Image (spheres, grey):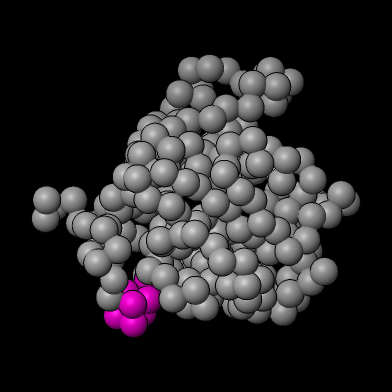
Amino acid sequence: MTFLSREDAGRQLGGFLKNGHLDAQVVLGLPRGGVVVAAEVADMLGLPLDVVVVRKIGHPRHREFAVGAMAEGDVVILDENAIAKTGVVREELVDVIKEERERLTAYQRRFEISGPLNVTDKSVLVVDDGLATGATTEAAVRSLRQRGARQVILAVPVASDSGYNRLNRVCDAVFALAVDPEFDAVGRYYDEFRQTSDDEVIALLADNHRRIPGLLQHGYKNHNSQ
């Protein structure tokens, strides 16, 4: 199964979810690419859109190789097997985590245009553009649990077997249009898979907030106003 673009994947995913009488009050995209998919889903479901910020934790000497992930609320998940096999020096890893935590905080300030989201006792729908290992998505889910979400549902256009099974252990429900036992990379399932910019994410959030000005009526208040 392939998609023309993230927008196409979001429309197909939204159509699938719309027919399932989904119990969700807000759609949360994983920046950056996941927000493009999430925006289409939110539009089809008529729900407010926001973000849950995550960061990969790269190997200290090979930063493109992930050895963990983190999310809002000081949630850190480490792949101890990968750390042991690749000889990660703990002192170096501490520096990487500190750096990524600073970047995560900066992204929170940049993307949370209506202030931090209050998810206490709410049902949230998390959306990404695909599920590979599932590490960053699991960090997002654990962050939402820690922040008091009543229910966390995950929806993705495509997932690996291992990622799908991993997230089923931590989510209330997981929906995927395709689960591929031969999964190798998210981009393989898209005809167009260009990089998404920060400005695009902010524009999608702002557009949703203008068209669905329901953050307050849905119970999601800017913490600064409480």
- Is 140 on the left-hand or right-hand side of 180? left
Kindly tell me whether residue 202 is visible in this rendering: yes
The mark tally for this picture is 0
Q: Where 170 sits versus 12, above or below?
A: above
Give the quarter of the image for residue 79. Answer: top right
Which contiguous range is marked in magenta?
Answer: 203-212
Between 5 and 17, the residue placed more toward the observer is: 17
- Is 41 on the left-hand or right-hand side of 19? left
Give the quarter of the image for residue 99. Answer: top left
Residue 97 position, x and y percent, is 45, 31
The residue sitting at 34% across, 60% down in the picture is 111
Task: Spot the residue most to the bottom.
Answer: 211
Residue 25 position, x and y percent, is 40, 61
Residue 117 is one of the magenta-drawn residues: no
The residue sitting at 66% across, 41% down in the picture is 168
Specify the quadrant that holds the N terminus: bottom right
- Is 71 on the left-hand or right-hand side of 66? left
Q: Where 24 sits versus 48, above or below?
A: above
Residue 16 position, x and y percent, is 66, 71
Between 60 and 16, the residue placed more toward the observer is: 16
Q: Where 104 sits versus 111, above or below?
A: above
Residue 128 position, x and y percent, is 58, 58
Kindly tell me whether residue 72 is visible in this rendering: no
Task: Spot the residue most to the right.
Answer: 182
The residue sitting at 43% across, 38% down in the picture is 145
The residue sitting at 18% across, 51% down in the picture is 223
- Is 226 on the left-hand or right-hand side of 134? left
Task: Spot the residue most to the front.
Answer: 21
Between 27 and 94, the residue placed more toward the observer is: 27
Magenta-highlighted stretch: main secondary structure? helix
